[in-house]
Image (cartoon, helix red, strand yellow):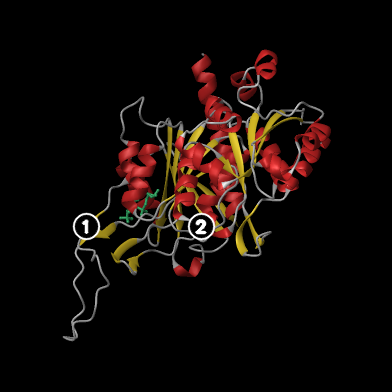
Amino acid sequence: MTGKRVLLIIGGGIAAYKSLELVRELTKRGHAVRCVMTKAAQEFVTPLSFASLSGEKVHTELFAMTDEVEMGHIELSRSADLVVVAPATADLMAKMAQGLCNDLASTLLLATDKPVMIAPAMNVRMWEHPATQRNLITLRHDGVSVIGPDEGSMACGEFGPGRMAEPVAIADAIEAHFAQRSGPLAGKRVLVTSGPTHEPIDPVRYIANRSSGKQGSAIAQALARAGADVQFVTGPAEAPKPEGCAIIPVETAAQMHAAALAALPCDIAIFAAAVADWRVQNAAPGKVKKDGSGKPPSLKLTENPDILREISQLKPGKRPALVIGFAAETDEVLANATAKRMRKGCDWLVANDVSPATGIMGGDQNEVHLLGAGDPEHWPRASKAQIAERLVARIIDWAKSSNEKAVC
Ligand code: CTP
């Protein structure tokens, strides 16, 4: 990889000392690092240490006359290929989420037009606090990529998530980010829905299905590796979250519907989620108790919005150019899938047999049929990662031919 320019913003936390190692790692890999330190960061490590390792002047002040003459803060925020915040403290994350800018670091983050990656580091209670988790969701929605935090014992003596990711892992994530910008799907925005949805019966019970989210995660991961800008809308799934994607966690079909619409416009949309067809209309605000009569409560179900159908049938211009649906069937797979593709209006449909004997639902392997305008194709049993790679290879071919048509 040719050398890139990284603007590293160092927040005020004990993990700041690990950022020295990050600078060393990045420069060793041939990248240029320019450092900005908050006032609090300078309580932990001196600017001189970062200047020595980066070989560059370290910026600390918003209103520094000489800095403004050499390079204004707006230019500083835009002269990098990537802005990395490590450690990203709870305070810096809150400022970023709110758009506050009262020092050099927060001003650069608001003024930048470049991608931003954060490596959070803080006490476990601060990380788990609803305010920080709310800010995290906002930042992910804003397209900020997040690496870590790791779990383990912390400088404050507590244990849990909150340790900054290791410098080598952050450097890897930075290089993966740069690789993505030059892959065959670079510049393509892709929506992927994945996992099951949970439909509440009351605050403690829900209706769900057996989807693990593994196939959706593998597709998102393969898309990100190919350079796509992936919006990954996921229900509560056990599968590991794909790296390098904007993760939008949801619980219910209604939330998935809203998140999918909010992710538009996009070039490609892939609906791998096993959305619950119905939700409980009379979901109880408190736990439903047995009433002693021996009769079960009656649940009134109502149909959920069909996200795939709605997005497939958007007007040209609003509709993603390529819409891919899935069909998990147990009988008459090809016939049902063919009818489903027509009914939904999607371009391609990936159909599979999820009868219990196949072990596909929740398993690590899949065997599918790809239905498009021509004859259905059978893809023999392979790992879900391989099926994902094959689907993404097909999407890359589609992208190439649609680019060529656009040029013609
Ligand atoms: N889908 C969706 N929204 C729904 C239901 C399904 O986006 N409310 C999408 C799924 O993500 C999948 C495709 O539609 O890509 C097919 O899902 P499936 O559950 O197989 O289809 P249904 O329309 O629910 O048909 P049926 O349950 O009758 O087979």
Classify 351 as above or below 114: below
Residue drawn at (72%, 50%) of the image: 166
Identify which residue is drawn at 25% across, 69% down.
Answer: 286
Outermost residue, left side: 293
Residues under labels 1 and 2: Cα distance? 34 Å
The label nearer to you, 1 versus 2, is 2
Badge 1: how crowded within 10 Å, few (<14), some, or many (20+)? few
Disc 1, SS: strand
Q: Position of residue 64 (x, y in %)?
A: 65, 21
Amino acid carrying mark 1 in the image: Thr
Label 2 Cα crowd, 10 Å radius (few <14 / some 14-19 / many 20+): some
Nearer the observer, 373 or 65: 65
Q: Amino acid at mark 2?
A: Glu
- Left or right side of 275 for 94: right
Nearer the N terminus, badge 1 or badge 2? 2
User: Percent x, y for residue 63?
Assistant: 61, 22
* Disc 2 target residue: 128
Quarter of the image for residue 106 reads top right
Q: Is residue 245 visible?
A: no
- In this rendering, the count of numbered labels is 2
> At x 73% / y 28%, what residue is drawn?
4
Query: Which percent across, then down, holds residue 332?
Result: 38, 58
User: In the image, is residue 219 above or below residue 70?
Assistant: below
Asked whether disc 1 touches disc 2, contact meaning CB atoms under 8 Å apart, the reply is: no
Mark number displayed over residue 3: none
Give how far across and how far down residue 56 sits, in percent: 78, 26
* Horizontal side of residue 278 vs 84, given as left or right: left
Secondary structure of the residue carrying numbered label 2: helix
Q: Which residue is mark 1?
A: 302
Q: Please determine whether, in this image, residue 220 is positioned above or below residue 215.
A: above
